[in-house]
């Protein structure tokens, strides 16, 4: 538990297995949500939020937890990793080069990547701290990490936790972290925070209208994009290896 954050009673390894099974079993249901009016509006706002702080000079992005490839395709990320074969089939159909793998053990050599994207991925992981460390290992010394989260202390975070308590197949195995908690996880892995953007300022019971993207971490927003870079000390003297 991080800073008193409320976790489920499911053990970490058990949760990871259950979340992977849920996405594999309900892949169609997950992907179809994005085509519904609410899903489409939320997705557009989140993509705009991430795009605002995604460095244009970084090439070769890889999305960790690529799922069905919606975010990767929208953000021109050409490669993705996910543990669910059914999700990867959908991502591949959207033109994404896919690899089977987990955030806690990325299938890439040390120092081989320029940019990693994790969109609503940390909340479904077995061990987010290990995943952060793996991201640091796989990135080159000027690499960037872009994380998109639903803050656990926002109205949207509380809304999704309630849906999980009510038995939702995805949210029942999720843990939603605050921006402060994500920053601490990243810093412990050798990253430093360099910028953020926020959207979904209105709560889930209010009309979305035309969601706007706001600079920085804005309290109560339902989605926040956080950009990190590796602290030079984290990669000092490190030589790339041939395998993870």
Image: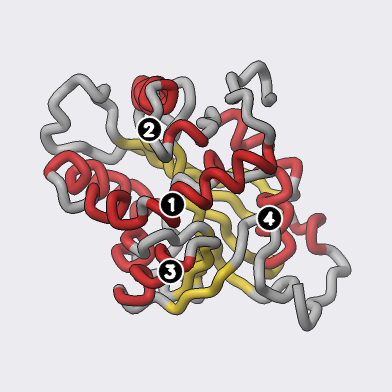
How far apart are the alpha carbons under marks 2 and 1? 12 Å
Front in this rendered view, residue 147 or 26? 26
User: Going from the N terminus, do you reach mark 2 or mark 1 first?
Assistant: 1
How far apart are the alpha carbons under marks 1 and 4? 17 Å
Horizontally, residue 178 falls left or right of residue 155, namely right
How far apart are the alpha carbons under marks 3 and 4? 18 Å
Residue underneath mark 2: 168
Q: Tell me what residue is drawn at x 28 percent, y 27 percent.
A: 201
Residue underneath mark 3: 88
User: From the viewer's perspective, is the residue at label 3 or at label 4 nearer?
Assistant: 3
The reply to whether the C-beta atoms of the residues labelled 3 and 1 are less than 8 Å apart is no
User: Going from the N terminus, do you reach mark 4 or mark 2 first?
Assistant: 4
Secondary structure under badge 4?
loop
Query: What numbered label is drawn on residue 23?
Result: 1
Q: Tell me what residue is drawn at x 43 percent, y 34 percent.
A: 171
Secondary structure under badge 1?
helix
Horizontally, residue 87 falls left or right of residue 142, namely left
How far apart are the alpha carbons under marks 4 and 2? 25 Å
- Where residue 211 appears, x then y in whole percent? 20, 37
**Residue projecting furthest to the top:** 4
């Amino acid at each position: 538990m991080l800073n008193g954050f409320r976790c489920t009673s499911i053990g970490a390894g058990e949760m990871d297995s259950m979340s992977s099974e849920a996405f594999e079993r309900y892949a169609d249901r997950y992907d179809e949500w994005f085509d519904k009016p609410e899903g489409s509006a939320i997705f557009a706002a989140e993509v705009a939020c991430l795009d605002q702080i995604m460095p244009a000079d970084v090439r070769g992005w890889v999305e960790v937890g690529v799922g069905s490839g919606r975010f990767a395709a929208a953000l021109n990320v050409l490669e993705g990793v996910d543990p669910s074969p059914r999700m990867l089939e959908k991502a591949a159909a959207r033109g994404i080069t896919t690899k089977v793998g987990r955030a806690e053990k990325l299938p890439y050599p040390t120092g081989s990547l320029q940019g990693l994207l994790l969109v609503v991925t940390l909340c479904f992981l077995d061990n987010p701290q290990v995943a952060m460390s793996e991201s640091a290992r796989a990135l080159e010394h000027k690499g960037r990490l872009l994380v998109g989260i639903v803050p656990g202390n926002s109205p949207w975070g509380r809304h999704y936790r309630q849906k999980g308590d009510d038995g939702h197949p995805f949210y029942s195995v999720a843990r939603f972290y605050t921006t402060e908690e994500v920053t601490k996880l990243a810093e412990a892995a050798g990253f430093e925070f360099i910028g953020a953007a926020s959207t979904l300022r209105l709560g889930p019971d209010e009309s979305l209208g035309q969601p706007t993207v706001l600079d920085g971490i804005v309290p109560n927003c339902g989605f926040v994009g956080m950009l990190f870079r590796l602290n030079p000390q984290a990669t000092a003297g490190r030589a790339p290896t041939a395998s993870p």
